[in-house]
Amino acid sequence: MRWGFLLAACCAMAVAPAVAQQSPAARQQVGAAIAIPFDPPLDRPLLYRQTVDQTRNGRPVSTSLDLRVTFARDGSGYIMTVAYLLPAGMSATHPAMVVLMRPISLRLNDRGAIVGMVDEAGYWAALDTIVDGLARHEGGNDPSAARMMRELMASMRNLPDESRLALITRNFSPIIEYSGAEMRLDEVLEGSVESAGPFGPVVQDVRTSLTGASASEARIEATYRLAPGQLESMIRTLQTRFRRAPDAREQQTLGELDIERRDSFRISLTSGLTEQHESVVTLRGQIGGQAGAALKRQRLVRQR
């Protein structure tokens, strides 16, 4: 199995949102409390543009997609539906694209927290129909890659509800990340978060602060950093599962990797929805035998 494929799989899981309760944190309380509401506009589409800039095989790659988001009442809570929109002139003819463009509907409570998914069984069934094709595309002639993708899907599917939904929704959950929250201006929260992952528990050190607020908008910064040895542990677990021991160079590489995610938010104090989100993932260390930093920058911006 290819080293890059292993690393990509583990990094995707490592930078997923932290969803478990935060441990007792160090606090610096300064300024008044800011209550972020959750009052989304109902039954009318909101458009967001998602842009991802990253490096693949040493070359910069940029992709962009639009999302249509709608909210509707559902008893005491809400239904949030997200659909990806293809660029003009393109059609979803590939089976993988059909699944990726399939709308996802989430059940939210009255504060905007995700509590479930509408027809989640249908979502997984659709993925099951294309996973072998995706595995062949990613793994080439390596049969262990196809097996890894099937087992990864099974591992994700068997995660606890909260962790599983966090992985499914990680590309658009920032829209409601801080809906219904209350924070103090310039308050710094620092602690650790543990969540379930396909390769075992994931522990992240988290630092969050409300850096600014006006009558209409709140600005929040958050930093997530894997606890020492976490990425190494996940990769080794994956290697053990597929009976592939790292060679001498990879053994040294594993101990030198460091991964961090920095997020910034601009949030409406009218609706409680994120107007703009930027996430930067930095992976430092020996990567594929070369020293440096692998960057992935993702932006989600509401379109007016």
Image: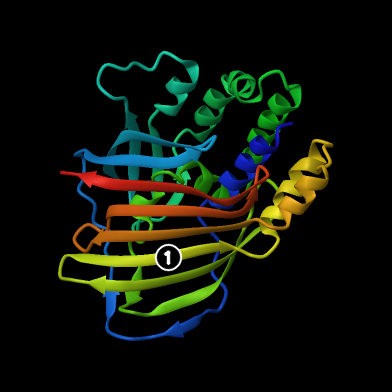
User: Disc count in the image?
Assistant: 1
State the image quarter where residue 68 is shown: top left
Q: Does residue 74 appear in the picture of this structure?
A: no
Instruction: Give the residue at x 46% y 76%.
Output: 189
Left or right, 201 with reference to 112? right
Above or below — where is 286 with respect to 153? Answer: below
Q: Position of residue 187 (x, y in %)?
A: 37, 80
Q: Quadrant of the C terminus?
A: top left
Instruction: Give the residue at x 26% y 16%.
Output: 89
Q: Dot 1 corresponds to which residue?
A: 222
Q: Quadrant of the N terminus?
A: top right
Crowdedness near tag 1: few (<14), some (14–19) or many (≥20) residues, C-alpha within 10 Å: some
Q: Nearer the viewer, residue 62 or 96?
A: 62
Question: Amino acid under label 1?
Answer: Ala
Instruction: Give the residue at x 63% y 34%.
Output: 153
Q: Position of residue 267 (x, y in %)?
A: 26, 60
State the image quarter where residue 148 is shown: top right
Q: Nearer the viewer, residue 22 or 290?
A: 290
Above or below — where is 233 with respect to 159? Answer: below
Q: Nearer the viewer, residue 249 or 46?
A: 249
For mark 1, give the secondary structure: strand
Above or below — where is 153 with respect to 304? Answer: above
